[in-house]
Image (cartoon, coloured by chain):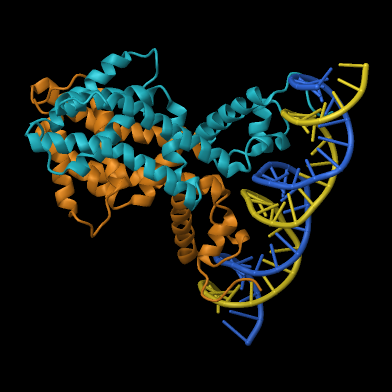
Chain colours: A cyan, B orange, C blue, D yellow
Amino acid sequence: MARTQGSHSDITGPRIRAAALRLFAQDGYAAVSMRQIAKDVGVQAGALYNYTPDKQSLLYELLRGHMDDLLTAREAEASKQLEPLAALEGFVRFHIGFHVARPDEVFIAYMELRSLNAENFTQVESLRRRYENELEGILQRGLESGAFSVDDAKIATLAVIAMLTGVNTWYRAGGRLSLAEVETIYWNMVKRAVVA
Amino acid sequence: MARTQGSHSDITGPRIRAAALRLFAQDGYAAVSMRQIAKDVGVQAGALYNYTPDKQSLLYELLRGHMDDLLTAREAEASKQLEPLAALEGFVRFHIGFHVARPDEVFIAYMELRSLNAENFTQVESLRRRYENELEGILQRGLESGAFSVDDAKIATLAVIAMLTGVNTWYRAGGRLSLAEVETIYWNMVKRAVVA
DNA sequence: GATTTAACTGAACAAACGTTCAAATCAAAG
DNA sequence: CTTTGATTTGAACGTTTGTTCAGTTAAATC
């Protein structure tokens, strides 16, 4: 046997990435074998290498793609150019909405950074830094205008992001609270923690 | 060759656990082999099995021990029985201090939960739930007394813990800020987010 | 000093790992 | 219908994996 009926790279490629994403999120990069990914797709392990040079690149492309999506989506939001308070609310709601919609991507973006080799790690890390700088910029402008008051802008940035990303550990669509309610609850806490 | 000079279970045992802890935190449970742990201790892989029945138990004992330490230390604090505001400040400072002092333990307690088998996972998870209930109890009492105001006590609990544990991602002893300063900065944010 | 017990080595086991590649088969183009 | 190119199989490779155990040596006991 060889090429199978209906096989096409436009179909198999995305399915491989989807399977890798799900399995990496579920069991961790190191614990998932190429044969498991292949089995999930319904293909032999060797076929994966038409789509990725190696396992490491498969992980990197997933993380890289996720960070690109995040920054692109954020740019669309940020271009609205609002005063600090509205900008902060926009960031909080955007962050929660974006992350809650992509639990697997978010999970591996945080958990599997260390599974990247040095070069790939640096790339992804710099994208994360760029995203954090978005929030830090908002806080900084609010401090200068007197709208916000925090002891340390950088620490407040990390504290707020940690708090917001924590939503992913418990939120499930169709649960007790709607997404809008969750956003509002967190926005209230952030507002009170940061606004003068 | 066989038993080596100076070998003793009181020495080798702790060294094995320390090596496993450090390596699991650094590279992840699945990515660390028993031979790597053994090499770090200066022993052959077979010798590890005098101290643990298998690799899984080695991880479980580390996580279980960490959670026991956390709850024991917390009980000493909590027995002070304070009114909500002081109790909340006590919790914030305790949480940061305890976690910052044990970066490796905290890291694997969060990252390697999924590497536990079902039974061990349930055990560790219930200990975590008990710890979260400490904070939730404080918030609940503060809500009843009118000292606090949050939309949802359970969510506020998770939000605060996520925010506080986030300190471990950036704090390094000997850095720009002292531990006391970090505690105060976070306490200020929590206070403002929660206190009426 | 002899004997018992504790601690470790070193080799071995089957299974699983990431990766490669010639051969085979299907899809698309002419 | 033939040819070309895209896609997958299935077997194989050299390593590494967790774990076991008979044999050996040091420490502890008497």
Q: Position of residue B41 (x, y in %)?
A: 51, 64
Q: Position of residue A144 (x, y in %)?
A: 9, 38
Identify the image quadrant of residue A133: top left
Residue at 38 percent across and 51 percent down: it is B104
- The reply to whether residue A167 is visible in this rendering is no
- Pick the front one: A106 or B146: A106
From this view, report whether residue C28 is shown above or below residue B1: above
Image quadrant containing the C terminus of chain A: top left
- Pick the front one: A44 or B57: A44
Image quadrant containing the N terminus of chain A: top right
Count of numbered marks: 0
- The reply to whether residue A40 is visible in this rendering is yes
- Pick the front one: A149 or D16: A149
- Pick the front one: B61 or A19: A19
From this view, report whether residue A112 is shown above or below residue B15: above
Q: Position of residue A98 (x, y in %)?
A: 36, 24
Q: Position of residue A44 (x, y in %)?
A: 73, 32
Residue at 57 percent across and 49 percent down: it is B53
Identify the image quadrant of residue A147: top left
Residue at 14 percent across and 36 percent down: it is A141
Identify the image quadrant of residue A84: top left
From this view, report whether residue B184 is shown above or below residue D2: below
